[in-house]
Amino acid sequence: MGEHARIGAYLKCPSRSEEQVCHHRSRLHNATSPTCETHLQDELLTRESLTTHNMPPWTLISPASRGIGFSLAKRVLQTTNAPVVVTARKDLDQVKEDLLKDGEFDESRLKVFKLDVLGKLHMHFSSQSLLSNYHLDETSIADAASECKKLYASKSHQLQLAFIVPGILFPEKAPAQINADDALLTFRTNTLGPMLMLKHFSPFLPKKNTPPSQDESEMKGLPAVATTVIMSARVGSISDNRLGGWYSYRASKAGVNQLVKTFDNHLRNASGENAMAIAMHPGTVRTDLSKEFWGNVKKEKLFEREWVAERLIGVVGQVGVEGRGKCWDWEGKEVPP
């Protein structure tokens, strides 16, 4: 590109002052000095660099209204300097208030958006067929991603850490106990929901040519490689299934493991070693999901959610790109597929 074109592009920038514009317009008529040309080129490169690196990476925890998601969000707020986006289906103000309680951090870092991975299931009947057509409305996921796009431009403000943790469990002990509606709800929550989250939030992940942040303060407490975590479970392992039961939950979590592997293969091509995906098994945690099974778990194997959140974030930092596309438990041990 010649200097006339470079200066012309420079003048189109809306942030230039009138004095700067007048100065460089005059140079359009006297663009003969190599020194002058080099100076302008350096200015343009500096401007581009600042545009690319002027904002820190951010984090996402969805949902975070209770359970493990709540504790993960609290932990990220406490141990990093990054902006934190959390989601909830309802009571957004209450969720924000609870997360900020007793916190010694800048509350402007926290944003709470409405998101329901279940969306709305619409049924359409055809006059020519007895079959109904089900349509899952993913609007709330798309809307939340749109709000994030307003705050965090993907070219300058990448998603460095994401925990996608929706979960529901119907513990069928025998085939006769399988209920079609419950099974459908399980897959919509545990598998399809995270799949749609990847659809709408993956554009925020860094690309192959995205330069990593060199600011230690920005990266404090965050993994060096942008990491997307989807919550799985040990019972999602096919090779480790020795007891049976929990048909819909096991199948939905096996689906999560396949989803993570497939998405990570996509990231290998799109992001190289700048982004990766893993699944995680948190163990049996003292939350509403596992409440009816607490009596069957040894005391030392029933974990508090705050402790698990600390362990999971620690494992994310330890795994590295060598462990991408796999499922890891709270101890940092691989869960076999």
Image (cartoon, rainbow, N blue to C red):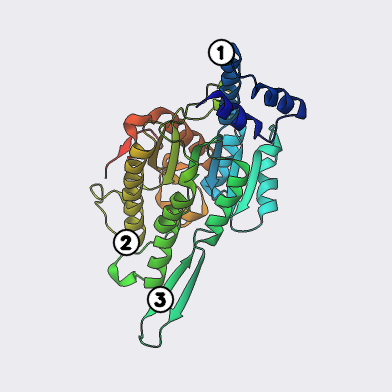
Provide the secondary structure element on which disc 1 rests.
helix
For the image, the number of numbered tags is 3
Q: Between residue 20 and residue 302, name the one nearer to us.
A: 20
Q: Position of residue 220 (x, y in %)?
A: 55, 25
Question: For the point 70% across and 38% down, which residue is it?
Answer: 107
What x and y, as percent, mark residue 289?
Answer: 48, 55
User: What residue is disc 3 on?
Assistant: 133
Alpha-carbon neighbours of circle 2 within 10 Å: few (<14), some, or many (≥20)? some
Q: Residues within 10 Å of mark 3 (few under 14, many from 20)?
A: few
Q: Amino acid at mark 2?
A: Tyr
Mark 2 and mark 1: Cα distance apart in space: 73 Å
Secondary structure type for disc 2: helix
Q: In the rendered image, which quarter contains the C terminus? A: top left
Q: Which residue is mark 2?
A: 247
Camera-side residue of 282 and 69: 69
Relative height, residue 214 to residue 14 (above, below) = above
Say whether residue 208 is left or right of residue 34. left
Q: Which residue is identified by label 1?
A: 34
Residue at horizontal 59 percent and vertical 30 percent from the top: 51
Q: Residue furthest right?
A: 19
Task: Estimate the spatial distance between the alpha carbons at disc 2 and disc 3, rounded to whole Å.
Answer: 25 Å
Residue drawn at x 38%, y 40% as measured from the top left: 278
